[in-house]
Structures are given as C-alpha cells and as structure tokens.
Amino acid sequence: MADEIAASAAPENGAGPRQGRSAFQRLLTVTIGPIVGAFLLSAVILLLVGVNPLTYYGYILERGLLSGLGLEQTATRMAPLLFLVASLIIAFRSGIWNLGTDGQFLLGAVAAAASAPLLVGVLPGWLVLVVGFVLAAIAGAIWSVLPAILRAYQGVNEIITTLMMSFLGVLMASTLVKLVLLDPGTTVPQTRTLPVADRLPRLFDTSISSGLIWGLVAVVAVHLMMTRTSFGMRLRVVGANPAAATHAGLSVPLLTVAVFGLSAGFAGLAGAADILGVQGNVRADWNPAYGLMVIPLVFLARFNGYASIVLVFFYSALLIGSESAARRLGVPQDFTLVLVASLLICLGLGEYIDHKKSRKER
Amino acid sequence: MDALLTDAFLSSLLTGAIVAAIPILLAGLGEQMSEKAGVLNIGIEGMMLMGAYIGFLVAFETHSIWLGFLGGILGGMMVSAIMAFLCVRLGLNQIVIGIGLTIGAEGLTALLHHFQFSRTYPRLPAPVRVDVPGLTDLPVIGSSLFGRHPIVYLALLGMIVLALLYRRTNLGMTLRAAGEKPSALDVAGGSVGRLRVAAVMFTGAMAGLGGAYLANIGAGLFLPFMTGGAGFIGIVLAMLARGRPLWVLIGALIFGAALSLTTALQVAGSNIPTDVIQMLPFAAVMLVLVLFGRRAKLPAALGIAYERGAR
C-alpha cells in the first residue's frame, strides 16, 4: 500500500510517456475537471434537498471571497489548515497514512491553551507564543508514538492505529478540558483564555492573524525539505520502496518513527495556530475536524506544497462561506463534507482517465 | 466497586454488550469478506451510516422494523456499489475512495436528516423481542441473552454460515485466491473482478444491516454521525480475526462490553465522565493491537487493484 501512495507521490516521474499531451490537457483532466465535477455532483444533491445550487454557490463566493471581511476571515482560517497540509505532505510523501491528525490537532490545541494563558506576564509575550507552539508540537508528536512504533517495529497497519488514536485523542482533549484544565473563573467547561492582546499579532490594519504567515512558512519549508534535502530524499525512498531503502543502508524503522513524529508535530502546531491566533481557549467538546478534510486537497495538489496553498485558500473560503450559509440559507455546514467527498471521488476518476489516455499514447 | 456488581448492573452490562456488539459483528463479518477477496474497505463507516439512515427512514415511514432492515441493507449496498465500481472496476486507490465515501455518507445523511426532520429526532416504538421459553426467566443472563430481537439470532446464524462457506466450499477457496494471488485465480478461469464486486456488495449489505440495527434497535432513532467509529472497529476485528468469523464474534463481544460500560456505569450512578468511558473501546482496540498486532494476518493482495497482465 505504501507503494501506492508513493506512486502518486512522484508526479515528476510520470512525465516521460505523456509528452504527446499538452500540460494543459493534463491540468484539465486531473485538476480542473475534478473540481468542476465535484461542484456539479454536489449541486445535484443540493437540488435534491430543494436548495438552488446557484444561490448557494453564489452566496459562498460572495461571503468567503468577495467581501472584505470574508476575505480576512478566509485568510485567518488558512493558518491551521496550512499546518495540517504540511503534516500530511510529510506523511504521504513518505508513504505513511497519518489519518490521526484530528486527535493530534486537538491535543496540540489543548497543550497551547493550557500553557499560554498561565505564562502571560511570566515570560515575554513572544516567548509565551513560542512555548505554546513547542508544547503543542510535542503533544501532537507524543500521540503518534504508539502508531509509529507499531508500524516501524511490528508492521501494524497505521491507517487503523492512527484512526483509533484520533478517536482517543479527541476524547482525551475533551476530558482534559473538563477535568484538569478548567478555567476556575467561569462555569462554562473551557480552558483559561489567552487575552486578545497576547495572541499572535494581526497583520497590518486587518483582522488577519499572522498565523497565516507561519502556516505558509511551514508548508514551503516542508515542501523544500521533502524535495530538496537528502533527508527528504531518504524519507521518499523509504516510502517508495522500503526494501530498497534497507538495501541502501537506511534505517527504515527510525526514519518511519521520524516521519510520524514530524507529521504529528505539525498537526499539533495546527492546533496551536488556531488557539494562539484565533480561539484563545479550548471549549470542551470543540472539534473542528479539519484533519480528514484536508486530505483531498493534498492529493489534488499532488503533494506539492505550492499547489496546496492555492487549494487551501479556496477551501478556506468555502468553509467561511458555508458557515455563514448555514445561518442564512439554512443549509447545514455538513454540506461541505459532501463537497469534499465528491472532490475525492472526481479526483480518482480524473486520475483514471489520465492514466488511460497516457497508456493509449504509448 | 461492590456496589456496582448488582444484578441490575450486570444485566444492563450484558444487554448493552450484546446490543453494542451486533452492529460491529455485522460490520466485521462484512469487512472480513472484502478483505478475503483483496479489497480493504475503509468506506465501511459510511456504509453503516447510510444503512442507519435509510434503515431508520424506512422503519419510521412503514412502521415495520423488518422493512427497515431491508432498507438498511439497500442503503449500505448503494454506497458499496460506488466503491465496487471505482475500486474494483476502475482500480482506483481503495483508501482514498474509502475515506471519500465515509466523509460523503456522513455529510449526506446529516444533510438529508436536516431537511427531513429539521432539528427533531423522532423515535421508533420499542422493538419486538423474542423470548426463548423458559430461558428468559433466568436471573441476570435471562433477559439479556434470551430476550433479544430475532435479528440477533440471525446474525449468529450468518456467522456460522460464513464460517462454513470459508472452510468447506469452493467459493470460500476462490475468494481466498482473489485476495492472496488474483493472477492465479484469473489463469484458472475465475473472475477476480466479479468476485471482488460481489464481496464488496456483501460488505455493504452487512454494514448497512449493522447500521440499521444501531439506529432501529440500539438507539431507536437516527442521529447524524451516530456510528462514531463502529465501522472502523469492524475493520480492526476483521484484521485481527485472521479470516475466521468466530473470532470476529469474540472480538465484537469484547468491544461491545467496553462500549456498553458507558451506559451501565451511568445506570449504576458512577460519576466518571462519559468522555473517559467512551475511550474504553478505542483503548481496548489499541491494547489488542499492541499485544497481537504482529499476528494480524492480511491477504497478500489486499488493497491492490487487480489488472490483468500487470506486473
């Protein structure tokens, strides 16, 4: 199975036999086609429940992309999503299915929310944020230790273990908030709140959180690490062909554990970015469940960091728009799940058509 | 802890264990069939959820729990038909499509439920139980073991039939070939594609039935996202059972007990937060994987689409 992810992880390798077709045609079948297909498929479902898809999509476009405030919210929402993209790029390019980012994200969020408010006044402002981020990364990484060891040394399939740890992590986060980290100052079950003044600074005169910048840095850094450094090269070899990696003298188990740690660490950072930049605290039972939703974007981008950034921007606008549409048009936000699922399926179909066409030319 | 070990507590624990075990037993048995044939069916969570929604809807509209089960089976099969087409016929990545189907079913059922019932959650009337004469009156185990809905006994019968199918019939052997060495089956004149499609459809039917049980008997109502990982637990059961249906049952009962501790402890008036108790089944899965994960045996060609003549 690892070979399969790796096969799609190496977009450059496929260039050879496809010379007969223009890059534009490829873009059409594997990127634009699936996106259009997903919106059409979802439109059918909107029609089925009696909502005019044009009204709905138009509203989302207007709210998430075309209004000033909406655009600022969209940019702010990108921060946690970008860290998650970084997390998934590391894992998928190394042939590891980390499906546990939701749990890692929430525990990172809880770690940041537990530490930062207590450190305000004790440490300088910037150090409070740094400590919050570092602790979040550690919390996320710890949650991947068990799946990492099971995969690296016992060969247990990480799809199941990371999913199970994710369920556990979500419940653990909520338990910690309710039992250990309760803010004594309020009756609502939530952690202490980081004052707005101590959160990540905002960009210029806008309401955009500077978490966006750090998220962009994270994705670019991860992209360069995976494509340009020898460490990234090693990870990709392990993902593409573990047997060959062993023959080449690489320590596959150690590198596997490293992949899990890095990937889960970035998922933890995503949680911190949301808490230290926007939320300020963690409420009990809060779970935005971004993790699985980001997967299609990363696949659509062919694990390319730069392409992922563009897609995250549009996905973020979709989230902001649909949250507002839930209130205004009465279409529950769950509709974004349908849209994301349609995207995954259309993506697979596009890939299939592309594969068939490139075969014919050979 | 003595106060916990009353008859009422044990009886509700046992009842809960069985009620919670049946959906994951059905899901696990279904998943086992797919895995044997070489398809890793991650979409099973979505199939359960769709089965739960359609099953509930049909039972609610027709006032017949049996038609509800039938609806659940069809609901699960609708999702698995997409999986069969995309992953077996077209050979797309089983994990990506599986995640897609799960996410899609989550969104679609929540959406449909919203437009159907808005924010109300209507209940079904309490299900009929079939009492086994004489045995139902036994203390503690009586009503919990022998006073269940007939579908429970059918599920157990199904498990036995599957065990015989895998061990004693040609079909069982052929299925195994499709999962272990599809090229050999192809050469021998069998159709890998057709077998795998049938296996995936069977998985959908079983998962859908499990979902319908969860909604119609377990809860008596439909809630969005109500499966809460039961399908994934079914996958673990199938992975650890090494191809034997009996082990799926044993696993399902253990996880069912862990799941039902939530309600049983609440009945007993324990003040442990529900979040902690809800961790039990997932913690149990991890514990089992730590202890026995190395021994999980999966078919050699699992997760790999079969393409004739490919290397």
Image (spheres, grey):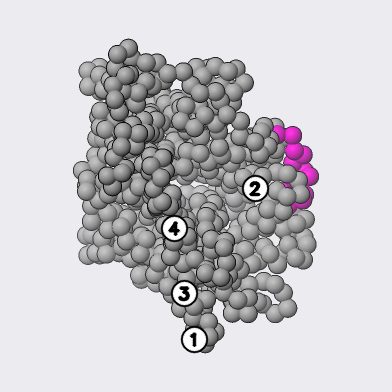
Respond whether the residues carrying marks 3 and 4 are from the same subunit.
Answer: yes
- Dominant secondary-structure state across the stretch colored magenta: helix
Residue, disc 3 = A115
Q: Is residue B44 magenta?
A: no
What chain is tagged by disc 4?
A: A
What chain is tagged by disc 1?
A: A
Q: Which mark, residue A175?
A: 4
Contact flag, marks 2 and 4 (Cβ < 8 Å): no
Contact flag, marks 1 and 4 (Cβ < 8 Å): no
- Give the quarter of the image for residue B154: top left
Is tag 1's residue or tag 4's residue first in the polypeptide sequence? 1
Q: CA distance from mark 3 to mark 2?
A: 32 Å
Respond whether the residues carrying marks 3 and 2 are from the same subunit.
Answer: yes
Whether residue B270 sits left or right of residue B170 in the image: it is right
Query: Of residues A96 and A132, which is closer to you in this image?
Result: A132
Contact flag, marks 1 and 2 (Cβ < 8 Å): no
Residue lying farthest to the top in this orientation? B133
Query: Of residues A33 and A329, which is closer to you in this image?
Result: A329
Residue, disc 2 = A333
Residue A232 appears at what percent x and percent y?
A: 38, 67
Residue, disc 1 = A123
Give the amino acid at mark 3.
Ser
Query: Of residues B61 and B289, which is closer to you in this image?
Result: B61
Contact flag, marks 3 and 1 (Cβ < 8 Å): no
Mark 1 against mark 2, which lies toward the viewer?
A: 1
Is tag 2's residue or tag 4's residue first in the polypeptide sequence? 4
Q: What SS does tag 2 mark? A: loop
